[in-house]
Amino acid sequence: WVYRSNIGHSPNRFTTAHRSILHARKTKNSVFYKDNVAEPYINQDDKRIKGRIESGSKGRAPYSWFYADLVKNVTKDKDLINHPCVIPDKISALLIQSVTMPGDTVLILFAGSGSEIDVCRKLERNWISAELSKNYCERIQKQLDNQILVFGDI
């Protein structure tokens, strides 16, 4: 995941402006729903691309790197999003949609601020999650009880 950064600039090295995402599969028969995440073809005037579009293709598979700006913690209600590593909804949604369909269940190993739970709710996915921090668990439970959608649209 690549992003712009205004911090961490150094005269001695390149500025870190990416985070790695681990994508694992359980079996060789795993699924990838390209149509859920298809991006427009770059050269739609090309004869081969026109043929694909006419045959019903929704676009090309996304690249293995994603661009999204960092989630900035500028909310006045610090209780809602005060987490050091919020992943943008756009990235979570892309990954979730690429391997699940509405009604499927997503395992979220680290609930953190609850942003991926919120994305699952918006995408009509079921979810199972875990979080070690009692404070984050309480905040997520409060959000679920009040049906608060914390983050922006996907």
Image (cartoon, rainbow, N blue to C red):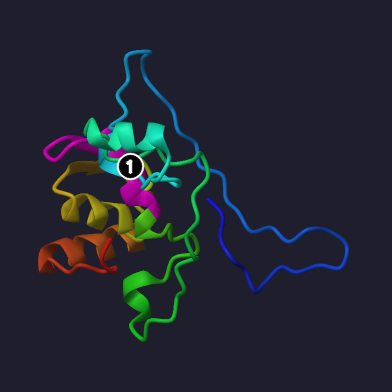
Q: Is residue 52 above or below residue 85?
A: above
Which residue is situated farthest in the top direction here?
28
Q: Who's the residue at 32% across and 20% down the image? A: 30
Where does the image place residue 44, in percent across and percent down from the top left?
A: 39, 45
The image quadrant of residue 109 is top left
Is residue 53 magenta-colored? no
Which residue is situated farthest in the bottom direction here?
76
- Evaluate whether residue 58 shows in this view: yes
Q: Is residue 46 above or below residue 138?
A: above
Where does the image place residue 145, in percent across and percent down from the top left?
A: 11, 64
16 horizontally vs 151: left or right: right
Where does the image place residue 140, in percent across and percent down from the top left?
A: 25, 61
Residue type at numbered disc 1: Ala
Which of 135/11 is in front? 11
Q: Who's the residue at 27% across and 65% down the image? A: 139
The image quadrant of residue 51 is top left
Q: How many labels sit on residues?
A: 1
Determine the secondary structure under disc 1.
loop
Which of 134/45 is in front? 45
Q: Who's the residue at 18% across and 50% down the image? A: 123
Where does the image place residue 36, in percent across and percent down from the top left?
A: 26, 40
Q: Which residue is mark 1?
A: 38
Q: Who's the residue at 35% across and 61% down the image? A: 113
- Evaluate whether residue 107 shows in this view: no
10 Å neighbourhood of mark 1: few (<14), some, or many (≥20)? some
7 horizontally vs 11: left or right: left
Q: Quadrant of the C terminus?
A: bottom left
Is residue 93 magenta-colored? yes
Magenta extent:
91-107
